[in-house]
């Protein structure tokens, strides 16, 4: 079956511009996560959505970062006024209620801020 | 704050060698420990979810153990093959609410030469 998909796969932007990254989770998965990996760093948690519950936003690094999940499915991560330190691979993951401990990752969006 | 350390940072072995790497954590205040495998240009793939002290899991030539009292998990690969080349990530599931936040180590990069 189809896995987690993300778009775009690569994004180059100029400092100060806004960017939107999209994630399509696996159908039927109620939980959705965003992580990022900056150069030389490990994977870093950003935000977690679970059904209709309030999201866990504890990993968002600043108020320039926001995410929403529409209709319990697709999610968009928005970075406003991008900075060079925002350059990273942004990964989305989802998990199902039946196997909630396992998170299935997408291929990521590689963001480069010039 | 949970901190996950992985060692070594990188490892180069010959085809047929057996190898192992370590994930260590100072606190047992987590719900589960995950091992992921991340090949270049692909999505991270779940290998094991370990939930009990003394838990052992095996998948083909790869196995893992968990010792929460001593604060470590080992991942073993028997008879390494070139296709095992990847970064192996350890992560702690910090809470469980039909899913939860993963805290990742920086990974061990394995290279297997034919």
Image (tube, rainbow, N blue to C red):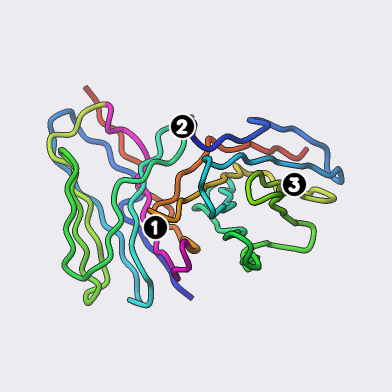
- Which comes sooner in the sequence, label 1 or label 3? 3
Left or right of B8 on screen, residue B56: left
Residue at 63% across, 68% down: A58
Left or right of B22 on screen, residue B39: right
Q: CA distance from mark 3 to mark 2?
A: 24 Å
Above or below B11: residue B89? below
Question: What segment is highlighted magenta in the picture?
Answer: B83-99
Q: Residues within 10 Å of mark 2 (few under 14, many from 20)?
A: few
Is residue B88 part of the magenta span, yes or no?
yes
- Quadrant of the drawing holding the C terminus of chain A: top right
Q: Position of residue A73 (x, y in %)?
A: 63, 46
Helix, strand or loop at label 3? It is helix
The residue lying toward the viewer, choosing from A21 and A52, is A52
Is residue A92 part of the magenta span, yes or no?
no
Q: Which residue is mark 1?
A: A101
Above or below A17: residue A96? below
Helix, strand or loop at label 2? It is loop
Letter of the chain that mark 3 sits on in the rendering: A
Q: Which residue is mark 3?
A: A84
Q: Residue furthest top?
A: B114
The residue lying toward the viewer, choosing from A10 and A101, is A101
């Amino acid at each position: 079956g189809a896995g987690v998909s993300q778009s775009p796969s690569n994004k180059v932007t100029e400092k100060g511009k806004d960017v939107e990254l999209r994630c399509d989770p696996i159908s039927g998965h109620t939980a959705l996560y965003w992580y990022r990996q900056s150069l030389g760093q490990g994977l870093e948690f950003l935000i977690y959505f679970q059904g209709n519950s309030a999201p866990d936003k504890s990993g968002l690094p600043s108020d320039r970062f926001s995410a929403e999940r529409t209709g319990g499915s697709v999610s968009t991560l928005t970075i406003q006024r991008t900075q060079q330190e925002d350059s990273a691979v942004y990964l989305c993951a989802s998990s199902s209620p039946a196997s909630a401990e396992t998170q299935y990752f997408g291929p990521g969006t590689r963001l480069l801020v010039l | 704050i949970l901190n996950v350390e992985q060692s070594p940072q990188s490892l180069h072995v010959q085809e047929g060698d057996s190898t192992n790497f370590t994930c260590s954590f100072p606190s047992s205040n987590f719900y589960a420990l995950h091992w992921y495998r991340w090949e270049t240009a692909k999505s991270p793939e779940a290998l094991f979810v370990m939930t009990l002290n003394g838990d052992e899991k095996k998948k083909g030539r790869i196995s893992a153990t968990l010792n929460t009292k001593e604060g470590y998990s080992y991942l073993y690969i028997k008879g390494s093959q070139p296709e095992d080349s990847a970064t192996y990530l350890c992560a702690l599931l910090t809470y469980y609410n039909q899913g939860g936040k993963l805290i990742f180590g920086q990974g061990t990069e394995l290279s297997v030469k034919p």
